[in-house]
Each structure stands twice: as structure tokens, then as C-alpha cells.
Amino acid sequence: MEALDALLNRVSVPRLTDPAPNAAQREALFQAALRAPDHGQLRPWRFLTIEGQGREKLGELFAEALQHRGDASQAALDKARAMPLRAPLLIVVVAKLQDHFKVPKSEQRLAAGCAAHGILIAAYAQGIGAVWRTGDMAFDAHVHKGLGLAGNEELIGYLYVGTPLTEPRTAPILETADFVSAWGE
């Protein structure tokens, strides 16, 4: 697939099933992530892969997080437990924020986000379905602790990855003029 085609046509694919990407496909996903803009070559990211029974363990961690917040209904707990089961592979994107005299932490967060986007583009280019999710469980301290995040790390998002259940939708064509304007003329 042409790079421009992947950039112009990638869409989120939320309905996923087995199989997960194979080893060669995963390598391409992570190699693409490592090409993200990286001022200072800090490599301010890391990735956790969760699959198989790890997804159920993550669902239990999500349910625990809800319980720590107060009274969660059984329906909410069941939903939290089921969330990681929506794809055969989850990739947790983590920003590793460092003190640096030239590269502010905000830029490091953006670099980790670009790494996540690289994974999504590489997935689309290989015919793999993927969707980036956040929600409450991306910002919960109990979840962060359970995933082993250090004090200088932030969870950027969960990438749900697998085989599309249906043909991906067609990307909408947006008018660039709605988003671009000249300045200083």
C-alpha cells in the first residue's frame, strides 16, 4: 500500500476479532511507532501488549478501579470486565516523560501520541483493524499502578488491534479550507 493512501484513508475499526497480528506484522507496527518525531532522541514512549488471558486480567483491573471509586453497579463492573475483550490484542501506549532542558514534557507526550498514530497507520497499511481508545481507564491511578507505570509515565491510550469483523468504512472527505488559513498576508 502506498504511504499516502494509508494516510488519507485510514479509519478506526472498532469491531475486531481473531486473529491478532502475527509476529512480522507486529514488528512492522512497532517499527512504524519508532519513526515518530522525537526531538532530542529521547524515545519518550513504551508499549505494553495484552492478549489472551491478560485481557481478562486487565478487565479485572478495570473492575477494581471502579470499585475503588465507590459503589459501582454490577452492570458497570461487567462492562469494565468486558472492555478488553473487544479485540484479540491491546497495545497500551505509555509516554515516558523526562526532564530535559530543550524538550518539554508536552512535546514528549505529543511524540508518544505520534508513535501511537504510527501503529494505527501501519495496521491499516497491512489490512489490520485498529482503534485508539481512552476513557476513564486511561486516566485512573489504580489502573496505572496495576499496569506498572512509573511516576514519570502517562497512559496515552489503548490501541485495540485485530481482524476487522466487517469491511472498514470509507474515510470521509473533509474540506481542507475548513481547517487551513493563511496568516500574515
Image (cartoon, rainbow, N blue to C red):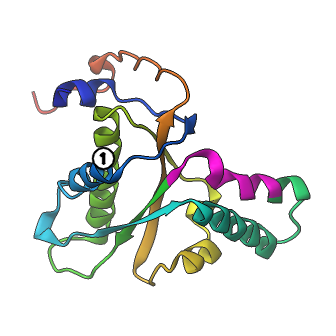
Q: Is residue 79 left or right of residue 40?
A: right
Regarding mark 1 in the picture, which secondary structure is present there? Answer: helix
* Residue in the foreground of this view, choosing between 88 and 158: 88
The answer, for residue 156, to whether it is visible in the render is yes
What residue sits 56% from the left and 39% below the top? 17
Q: Residue 135: percent from the left, percent from the top?
A: 60, 53
Q: How many marks?
A: 1
Q: Residue 97: percent from the left, percent from the top?
A: 33, 75
- Name the magenta segment's main secondary structure: helix
Up-down relation of residue 38 to residue 32 (above or below): below
- The answer to which image quadrant residue 1 occupies is top left
* Residue in the foreground of this view, choosing between 24 and 132: 24
Q: Is residue 13 left or right of residue 6?
A: right
Q: Where does label 1 land, which residue?
A: 25
* Residue in the foreground of this view, choosing between 107 and 46: 46
Residue 142 belongs to the span the image colors magenta: no
Q: Residue 58: percent from the left, percent from the top?
A: 63, 66
Magenta extent: 78-89
- The answer to which image quadrant residue 113 occupies is bottom left
Q: In the picture, which quadrant includes the C terminus? A: top left
